[in-house]
Amino acid sequence: MTEPSAPPPGNARRWWIVGAGALAVVVAAGTVAWSLADSGREARPTTTAAVASATPTPTPTPSRTPLPAVPDRPSAEALAALPLAFHDAVIGQLLDGSQVDARNRWTTATPKVPLVPLYAAPDADAAPVATLSSSVSTINTPAATAVWGRSAGRDGGMVLVSTPSRNRTPGDGGVAEAPSSTFAWARAADFTFARIDREVRIDNATSTIAIVHRDGTVETSETARLGTPDDPTPADTKTYMEANYVDPQVPYTQGHPISLTGAHSSKLSGYGGNAALTALHFYPDPNGSSHGCVRITAAMTEALATLPIGTPIEFS
């Protein structure tokens, strides 16, 4: 290690000043230390900047946009005065496929109340146009329907569901055809919901029926006997499985389950004493055509019977 060289002769005064300054710093530091020790306080200097940075700036809480309101539930008297949406009813305010964008939500909706009010719009000030029963008329089985859309709102908002009714019949106003199926908006609070992963697809072009999973895989499919141009099977229609039951009064089904859909004939105002409802059912003759229903094998009727009521059905 080398020794520091001595200062030049002419710089002695400058070094003395620097040395004095250093001594002053040492003295000052000693004074501060003595002062703090004497007061018994911790030696922790603070500055204005440090205090300012230690105080957090409050973050403003963003205000939430309130959810849209939904219609209030009508009184029991008001509900009783509305038309009941059942398979033989014609209710002009119900919506058809040209009025809604129905997309499968892979959800069934079961009424929590005896009568669910139905609406033509999902608006808070909409007036109910009909009611949906918690049971299927004539066979008195629990009802459920398919969900095809949903709007945001309080209490879960509003849901677009299938109904078993028509909004007009073929021939009304001189128009030969009528929509096969209808939809309506309803309060989500009036239902319990269940997720599903299968739907039924009937293809008029290929005369096939299939049970298809949400991911597109086919569980089972077969050739079906469909209607004729004069009394066709519904096409380009979305509906639901309204009921699945055995009816001994329909002998040609031979005790196999009947899957009743919410769709009607687009050209027949009535058939067999009802409003030309479309069913998926067994028929012993494997040949020929139906009057609009979908004739299937016994194996397919049993497969359909495993699906929950309210399962979506799509006719193409």
Image (cartoon, rainbow, N blue to C red):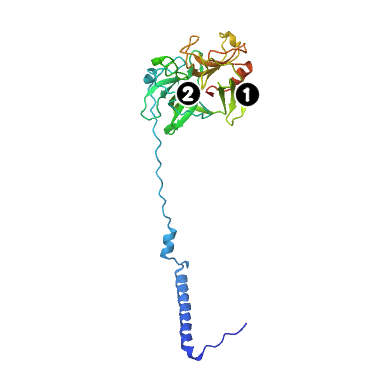
Q: Specify the quadrant that holds the N terminus.
A: bottom right
Type of amino acid at the residue the image marks with label 1: Thr
Q: Residue at x 45, y 80 (%)?
A: 24
Type of amino acid at the residue the image marks with label 2: Ser
Residue 68 left/right relative to 235? left
List x then y, in percent, for residue 238.
50, 24
Q: Residue at x 42, y 33 (%)?
A: 154
Considering only vertical position in the picture, is 52 above or below 218? below
Disc 2 to disc 1: CB gap under 8 Å: no
Q: Quadrant of residue 169?
A: top left
List x then y, in percent, for residue 203.
56, 22
Q: Nearer the viewer, mark 2 or mark 1?
A: 1
Q: Secondary structure at mark 2?
A: strand
Considering only vertical position in the picture, is 280 above or below 57? above
Q: Residue at x 47, y 73 (%)?
A: 33
Front residue of 235/38: it is 235
Which residue matches tag 1? Answer: 220
Q: Quadrant of residue 4?
A: bottom right
| Residue at the outermost front position | 229
Front residue of 189/210: it is 210
Q: Residue at x 62, y 26 (%)?
A: 219
Residue 126: numbered disc:
none
Which residue matches tag 2? Answer: 162
